[in-house]
Image (cartoon, coloured by chain):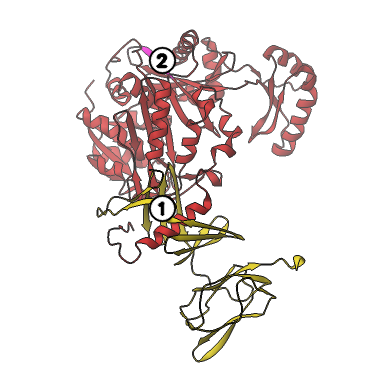
Amino acid sequence: MDYLFETKNGLVSVYVSGSSVRVRMGTNSNSFQLEDLIKMEHRSLDTNSLQSVTMKDGSVLKYLKVRNEIFFHWKGEIWSGKLAERSYEGAGQTSPEIKSPMPGKVVQISTEVGKEHKQGETLLILEAMKMENAVKAPYPCRVEEIRKLQGDLVQQDEVLIILHRIDSEKT
Amino acid sequence: MKPIQKILIANRGEIAVRVIRTAKKMGIKTVAVYSDPDAHSLFVQSADEAFSLGGTDARSSYLDVEKVIQACLETGADAVHPGYGFLSENTDFAKKLEKHGIRFIGPKPHAIEAMGDKIGSRMLVAKSGVPVVPGYEGASQEMSVFKKEAEKIGYPIMAKASAGGGGKGMRRIDTPEELEPGILSAKREALSAFGDDRILLEKYIINPRHVEFQIFGDTKGNIIHLHERDCSLQRRHQKVVEETPAPNYNSELKSKMSDAAVMAAKAVQYEGAGTVEFILGGSGEFYFLEMNTRLQVEHPVTEMTTGLDLVEWQIRVCQGESLPQIKTPPQKGHAMEVRIYAEDPKEGFLPSTGRIHHLSFPTRDYLRIDSGVVSGSEITMFYDPMIAKLIVWGEDRITAINRLIECLSETIVFGPKTNLQFLQRLVSTKEFAEGNVSTHFIADNEPELLSDKTKEELKLALAGAFFTSKEPNNPWVKETT
């Protein structure tokens, strides 16, 4: 699952796959393995109490989900994560995630991880409504991650590729 | 005098809840008055009767003297408890109630008036021999006069714009050599900031502490003190942590200051609960700041260490009874209070409004929670954003501190941002443990007090992880909309 959280420092993308979580803030990326953090989840059936989790170090983390927001209490600290409104930025976008602009099928991947692209070069081709649409590099970049395979069906706003921006003066 | 039958509480939130609790215990009926946004508040539900004042902001509700008096007449209340803030120090209100034969649970209007005037009250208590901050506020702005007055006051001194405020036109002057340039520079700044270059001089107090005394008087002329409270931890003159007994406070100094506090109260034949506030300097010099003619927010620490109910005392005195004890009762142990606010410390402590999705406190026999909100309550922008006062007791100071830290770390507020974490950091500092803080401590240490233990990346990783985990099958997570 892919989440986009609103934070004071802008949007942050969190990608959860099984027990591994990757957090991208600006150009920094951090990975976490949930089994290194969490010992046991307690499933509470009491609707009035918070959900609680025992962490590896024996501490208890409590949380509550309210619509698009999730609140945490852990070791005396309280924080929340609020999901961002869906953003539909096309050309001129600056975020590292390249998302599917529409539901469709990946018909061709024209790049590979580590490859560098100039602005406007085609990264992949998406077929939708019997039409081919080229998804292009919005800025000079290097491909960090490719999330889809040729032939995959994708929903609107699913992350297809993650890019690392290359500053023009360095190229 | 006939005993009070029905008290109208001209206030809201935690203090209204707290007054209702004591009135109930004494078998007195209670009336809550409320504004539109408060219609479903805890204090409205706690009272025997509730009367709508209408209005949204304070001005159109709790501060509207005519509306509150109308509420008294319509509900047949024979006494009003004003709490703190709002109309608690409004002499016009107290006088009007008197005219209607309704008792005001507080001092007589003349005492409120005399102490409400900051400069007048200092002159008044100074006449009774209570020390006030030495200063010069004369008409002459001659440098030779400033020099002479500064010698009299003693260095360091503070030159302040008479029209001042907000730190503009203020200069600390440590030596006679700095006096002339300091005053001239303060004058220039004052002139451009306020269009008025008059300057006053005041003694500058190094590492000032705020120590106040709880005072109680009755109609028979008895006036006693109920010990001190140290409220040195402040942020922009707002108290953040309060405790009693004061740390590093010897009995000789306490006895001098408590005598001065009682003297100040006697200067206005004080009746009921009041607080005499002092500024205490590093070398034991102390000066009268002001007297608050009402119950204070921090009164619970006094109650926790004396076992008294100050609201009950207020009601008894108002009924014409003598003070239940005419000698200062002993104190047992140590108590501390913190004020939990819906505010964002990382955004300059701006109030944070919205619904409280979840609110829970630990339960301990040494913990007292005074709160006016519950899970589901809304913090609005109309009033003070206080969520609760958390008060702990311990056999000694260090026990109280440890318990306070523990209770704060177990308190959960989901919804608006709060100062909970900031408070934990604050009471966990070495300086606080040593009783070594001045009123400047928070301002001087803000960055460290605002730091987090958990890294931002981890917070977000957990947010993502738990958003996912039960997404399709979580019928048990309650939507508190």
Q: Is residue A39 left or right of residue B151?
A: left
Q: Which quarter of the rendered picture does the C terminus of chain B lie within?
A: bottom left
Q: Residue at x 51, y 43 (%)?
A: B453
Residue at mark 2: B269
Q: Is residue B295 visible?
A: no
Q: How far across and how far down the image is residue A131, in percent?
A: 53, 90
Rendered hue of chain B is red
Q: Which numbered circle lies on residue B234? A: none
Residue at the spot x=50%, y=33% of the render? B426
Secondary structure of the residue carrying tag 1 is strand
Shown colour of chain A: yellow
Report whether B348 appears left or right of A117.
Answer: left
Q: Foreground mark, 2 or 1?
A: 1
Q: In the picture shown, does residue A82 fall above or below B445?
A: below
- Could you tell me which chain the residue with mark 2 belongs to? B
Residue interval drawn in magenta: B220-228
Q: Is residue B290 inside the magenta stretch?
A: no
- Label 2 to label 1, Cα distance in Å? 53 Å
The residue that disc 1 covers is A71
Residue B178 is situated, as x and y percent measured from the top left of the image, at 78, 22
* Residue B371 drawn at (x, y percent): 34, 38
Q: Secondary structure at mark 2?
A: loop
